[in-house]
Amino acid sequence: MNDMAKFVRSNQEQAAASWVNYLNQLRIDHLLSSFSQQDENLLNALASVNEAIRVIDLEVVTANRGGQHGMHGFIAEIAEVGISNARRQILGLETAYQWVNDNGPVDLMRSGVEIQQKFVAAGGRFSLGAIGEHLQKYPDYVQNGGKYQIPGDHFEVIQRLHSMPREEAGKLLSRSGGGPSFRDWQRIDTFFKEGSIGMESLEPSTLKYREVQRDVYESTMAAEGNSLLSTDQSLRDNAYQESLPNLQEGATATLAAAVIEGGTALVLAVVAKRRKGMRLRELSQQDWLDVAADTGFSFVKGGVRGFSIYSLTNFTATPAAVASSIVTAAFGIAELANKLRRGEIDELEFIEKSELVSLEAAVSALSSFVGQALIPVPVLGAVIGNTVGAVMYTAVASSLSNREAELIECYLGEQRVLDEQLAAEYQELIEKLDQGISGYLGLLERAFSPDVEIALFGSAELARGVGVAANEILDSEDKVHAYFLD
């Protein structure tokens, strides 16, 4: 393979690797962007809940607005706005609710829709009595597009009883039995038959009647805050799962690498034929079979390369350029191994050429990595870096003359001689050290002998050995008496 073909193939290999790396980076960038956006969503959602609590505390509870029997209605309005907006904000949506707060026919506005909220349990009519009174004052309210919002638990009962046949309703137990009674069914049935609105004019609140009472709303809002945190974590988990490598993306990377490598092989094969002076229309069936075989083999290699790079970069934290070079080296060494088995090269040639293949792959990886860093454009930087690196490597490799090679060999020989000399000197020093330590241990053994006489002479020897002055060593009875008695 000539140098130009090697450059083209090397660039094609690193281009495929860079493309896989680009796909991986897109997923990571999208994940980080999602997390950053979710941080903002969570802050906004919690802020809506906290603002609702603040307004309820100051403008309703502290001000005793609505009194003992009407306060929960104002709490419900403010809580509905805060919670509904927060549930949209945690999903990254715009707020939709506004509190009107003017004691008029409209309590809330939701994206242009007027809402009158009724949280009334008195009379056992599940807030329908309050709706009837409002309709008497504002008969055109529903016709003008208005909606009535009632507690979620009231709506469930009304919806169930409204759709229940009279025969089935007659079997209902009394209210003392814990559920709705036949009388409840009659009230609801009468309301819709005599009234001017249908079920479509009603909607459930996000809150139940009990949840907005003065002694309960704080725990209700706290529970909503915890629910928002749970939703936030679920959204982050989903974003993380979506960012993981997947079979579809792996298949795309595999096919792209196969097409690139197969296409490159096709072009190189045709160019090789043209360089032999053959025109395309002059190519024989065998020539085209040769081109097709080379192209097909390269297509398969490209597929293996793409799948391998995608797997290495996503499951072993290997940079794409390095992953491509690993695959390239593996292909090259596998080809040399086949030649070794067929007897086309000997073991020494196999080792030398394997080292050369690995070196070239390493140069390609480093060049592509540097090029991509200096030119942060997907694929382009890697290709330019690989080209420059390959040219520099070829120039350096070919510039070594025989004389320079001999100088290197001479230097290596000198290094080997020096290594042997230093090893001999090191061994000699070790032996001397062993002898010294052996003598020192003998002195210690005599100095601390259980025999007092041996210990006395051993201590004296040890003192002389460590450099104590002779006149200070207690090596006779006179010196011992003089030291302890004088």
Image (cartoon, grey):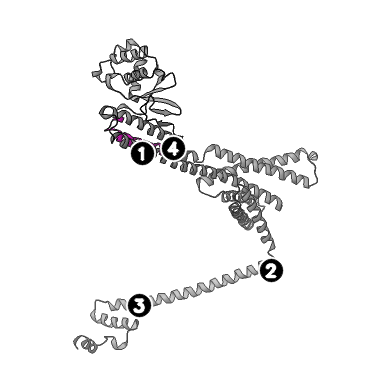
Q: Indicate which disc, 1 or 4, sits on the residue closer to the N terminus.
A: 1
- Does residue 223 belong to the magenta stretch? yes
C-alpha span from label 1 to label 2: 82 Å
Q: Disc 2, disc 4: CB below 8 Å?
A: no
Foreground of the two, 74 or 465: 74
Amino acid type shown at disc 4: Leu
Residue 375, position as x, y percentages in the image: 61, 52
Q: Amino acid at mark 3?
A: Tyr
3 or 4: mark nearer the eye: 4
Q: Secondary structure at mark 1?
A: helix
For image coordinates 42% across by 25% down, the residue present is 114
Q: In the rendered image of this protein, does residue 390 appear above or below residue 427?
A: above
* Image point (80%, 40%), residue name: 282
Q: On the image, numbered disc 4 is attached to which residue?
A: 235
Q: CA distance from mark 1 to mark 4?
A: 21 Å
Please say if 95 is above or below 116.
Answer: below
> What residue span does the magenta drawing correspond to?
211-233
Q: Which mark is residue 440?
A: 3
Label 1 neighbour load within 10 Å: few <14, some 14-19, many 20+:
some
The reply to whether discs 1 and 2 touch (Cβ–Cβ < 8 Å) is no
Report, in whole angstroms, how far the alpha carbon at label 1 lies from the one at label 3.
80 Å
Are discs 3 and 2 less than 8 Å apart at CB?
Answer: no
* Residue at x 80% of width, y 38% of height: 281
